[in-house]
Image (tube, helix red, strand yellow):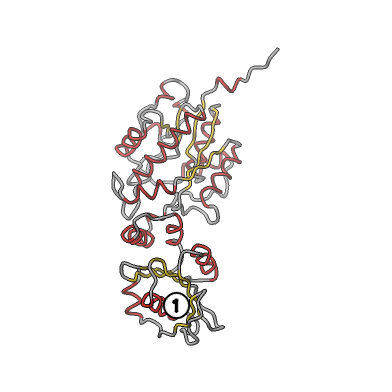
Amino acid sequence: MEMIDKTCFLPKALVLLSGGLDSSLVIGMMLKQGIQTEAINFVTPFCTCTKGFGCRLAAKTAALKFRVPLKVLSIGREYIKIIKNPKYGYGKNMNPCIDCRILIFKKAKEYMEKAKASFIVTGEVLGQRPMSQHLKAMKIIEEESGLSGLVLRPLSAKLLEPTLPEKEGLVNREELLNISGRTRKPQMQLAEVFGLKDYPCPAGGCLLTDQAFARRMADLLKFTRTPTLNDIQLLKIGRHFRLGDIAKVIVGRNEQENKRLLTLSKGKNAILTTKGERGGPVTTVRGKTNNDTLLSAAAICARYSDDKGKDGIRVMGQEEILNPPPISEKELERLRI
């Protein structure tokens, strides 16, 4: 007699998994109700959760903990387009939170249909994020992404209108929660129930909410018609200086950043280093390079070199040695992004 796979009759949820505490908890909540669960993680260049592979690694760790399948998708290039002109504007800095969520939900809906899931689940908490986690924003995001009634937020569900999966009996509303605001205590207590320990990024993080990074991002969008992911990666490291509208200078702050600058700038930029043995920063010029920009970059490089450029600054791949005096502090601050 042929065995029947009973799982094909169970409802299936697709969880938006960042790898943080909240999104990890809702996986446990769905599994506790006997609901088939799959997770999806969206990778952007702006996550601040963890080092290394960041949110992607945290999401994989959570998926392994609960033994659920995980799909990882990159939305970097599409995200950059949104940042340039978000329909619903920015938050305090350069964070287009509502437009970001709409993009993520649209992509999740596409995958939900492929995965044959019945609804979307998120770890969102009502009132936790000022721009995107209030009732009006949540409604806009669902409508714009074509997911009205299909987004379950288990941590705050009892404070929200019942979703379609609740109305249809796929999810037991009585087992859902009524958490709101920025408190973390209920989630931490629930983490103990599910055996979650050493969870990363308890409150999440986005570089676009950081004032210094947002300033660099605004500068990039102002002077670069079509930013690339390489451009975005450069924003995360070094000291940045603007030489008018034609070039930007980036100076490494330590050995790790120097190596990263060499990797990201290879074949794309003029690279300057100190000629002396005492060491100094890798300095890269992104944009148009001419004698004036190279001299300015060399003066900045000299300022941060151990020998203050005494032995000269060399342009990698060229024989000529540049010997400008270190840039003044006043001029340095004028150019700083």
Q: Residue at x 41, y 77 (%)?
A: 300
The quarter in which the C terminus is drawn is: bottom left
Q: Looking at this view, is 294 or 194 the one in front? A: 294
Q: Nearer the viewer, residue 124 or 108?
A: 108
Where is 241 relative to 326, above or below?
Answer: above
Residue at 49 percent across and 28 percent down: it is 117
Instruction: Left or right? Give the position of 287 relative to 7.
Output: left
Quadrant occupied by the N terminus:
top right
Q: Position of residue 242 (x, y in %)?
A: 35, 69
Q: Give coordinates of residue 171: x percent, y percent.
A: 47, 25
Question: How many dots with numbers?
Answer: 1
State the residue position of label 1.
301
Horizontal and vertical percent position of residue 141: 34, 37
Q: Residues within 10 Å of mark 1 (few under 14, many from 20)?
A: many
Residue 54 vertical placement versus 192 (above, below)? below
Q: Report the residue that reaches farthest toward the bottom.
A: 310
Work out whether residue 320 or residue 252 is closer to the camera in this orientation and state it.
320
For the residue pair 44 and 263, the one nearer the viewer reads as: 263
307 up-or-down from 180: above or below = below
Q: Residue at x 40, y 70 (%)?
A: 249
Badge 1 marks a residue whose secondary structure is: helix
Q: Residue at x 31, y 47 (%)?
A: 86
Amino acid carrying label 1: it is Cys
Residue 62's image quarter? top right
Residue 218 percent coordinates (x, y): 33, 59
Q: Residue furthest right?
A: 1
